[in-house]
């Protein structure tokens, strides 16, 4: 039977937030590296992920078509299916469809409304839902169940690491300052829109530092849930953990991602391996 596949996208998690977080469970899978996303925001980046592309290494002196060919060949080892190539993805150019063709049960859970089931992203999933809360990786982990008869593909888009970097369960260790920061940011936006003299106020450098710290804590929260997830995965499960894009915390006077041209919005963590 081919390997199971678990593909985790920590939405908006920039590389250094991952690198600074304590992630003992992700470390058990593999040490993550800095890579580059194909886009600066959720929808186009997930389009390339759903095509079967992973975050790239920005190789020099090589044709893009060669890089794509090598990238697609990596699915052979990930899945343990010997004859996979780019042709296996034709004509739909869909990772989920290719896996369905190989007999997989395909399950998607997403946290960002832009990926909701009415969009083309849900195509070729046997079971695809937008989570009712944007920060509920815990419920995604709960639903994971592998079968001895059929390989599974679980795709998870996580909102915990997306602004406002808030965690669901109040019984978790209190994350100091986040509510204050979020309220403060709303105030800052109001001040900006009310401003008539062009003296717009933006988030302070202190807000940015606190928000960045908050994203790091959310990565640590996700990592703790990955321990539960790993305990459920059979040995023949290939796991990928990455992000769809990064985030700016004040660099270049940007906050967030999307219509932003900055290195920090493209730099993402990437790690993958067979279940440890
Ligand atoms: Zn995103």
Image (tube, rainbow, N blue to C red):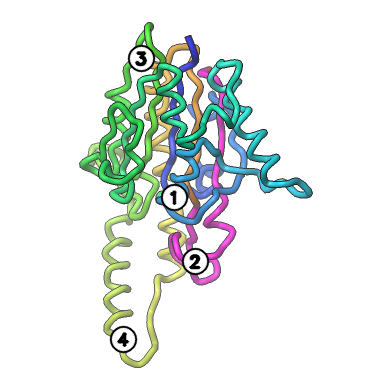
Residue 129 picture location, percent across and down: 26, 36
Location of mark 4 (residue): 195
Pointer 4 or 3: first along the chain: 3
* Image depth: mark 4 or mark 3 in front: 3
Q: Give the Cα distance between marks 2 and 1.
A: 15 Å
Name the element at disc 2.
loop
Name the element at disc 3.
loop
Location of mark 1 (residue): 12
Residue 55 picture location, percent across and down: 57, 42
Say whether marks 4 and 3 touch (CB < 8 Å): no
The dot on residue 250 is 2
* Image depth: mark 2 or mark 1 in front: 1
Pointer 2 or 3: first along the chain: 3
Q: Give the Cα distance between marks 4 and 3.
A: 55 Å
Say whether marks 2 and 1 touch (CB < 8 Å): no
Q: Give the Cα distance between marks 4 and 1.
A: 29 Å
- The segment highlighted magenta reads 246-275
Tell me: residue 197, above or below residue 130: below
Asked whether, in this view, residue 35 is left or right of residue 235, the answer is right
Name the element at disc 1.
loop
Q: Give the Cα distance between marks 3 and 1.
A: 28 Å
Q: Residue at x 59, y 59 (%)?
A: 263
> Crowding at label 3, few (<14), some or many (≥20) Cα neighbours within 10 Å?
some
Tell me: residue 259, above or below residue 213: below
Please tell me which residue lies in front, 41 or 205. 41
Which residue is situated farthest in the top direction here? 148
């Amino acid at each position: 039977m081919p390997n199971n596949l678990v593909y985790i996208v920590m939405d908006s998690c920039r590389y250094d937030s991952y690198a600074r977080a304590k992630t003992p469970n992700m470390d058990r899978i593999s040490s993550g590296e800095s890579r580059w996303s194909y886009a600066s925001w959720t929808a186009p980046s997930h389009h390339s992920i759903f095509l079967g592309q992973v975050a790239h290494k920005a190789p020099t002196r090589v044709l893009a078509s060669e890089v794509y060919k090598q990238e697609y060949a990596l699915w052979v080892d990930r899945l343990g299916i010997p004859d996979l190539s780019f042709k296996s993805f034709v004509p739909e150019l869909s990772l989920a469809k290719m896996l369905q063709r190989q007999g997989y049960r395909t399950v998607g859970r997403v946290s960002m409304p832009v990926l909701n089931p009415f969009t083309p992203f849900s195509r070729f999933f046997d079971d695809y839902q937008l989570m009712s809360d944007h920060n509920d990786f815990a419920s995604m982990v709960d639903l994971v169940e592998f079968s001895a008869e059929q390989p599974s593909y679980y795709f998870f888009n996580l909102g915990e690491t997306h602004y406002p970097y808030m965690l669901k369960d109040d019984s978790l260790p209190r994350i100091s300052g986040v509510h204050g920061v979020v309220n403060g940011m709303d105030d800052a936006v109001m001040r900006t829109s009310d401003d008539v003299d062009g003296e717009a106020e933006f988030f302070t450098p202190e807000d940015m530092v606190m928000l960045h710290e908050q994203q790091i804590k959310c990565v640590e929260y996700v990592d703790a849930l990955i321990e539960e997830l790993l305990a459920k995965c059979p040995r023949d499960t290939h796991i990928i953990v990455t992000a769809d894009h990064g985030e700016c915390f004040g660099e270049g006077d940007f906050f967030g991602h999307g219509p932003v041209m900055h290195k920090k919005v493209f730099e993402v963590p990437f790690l993958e391996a067979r279940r440890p």
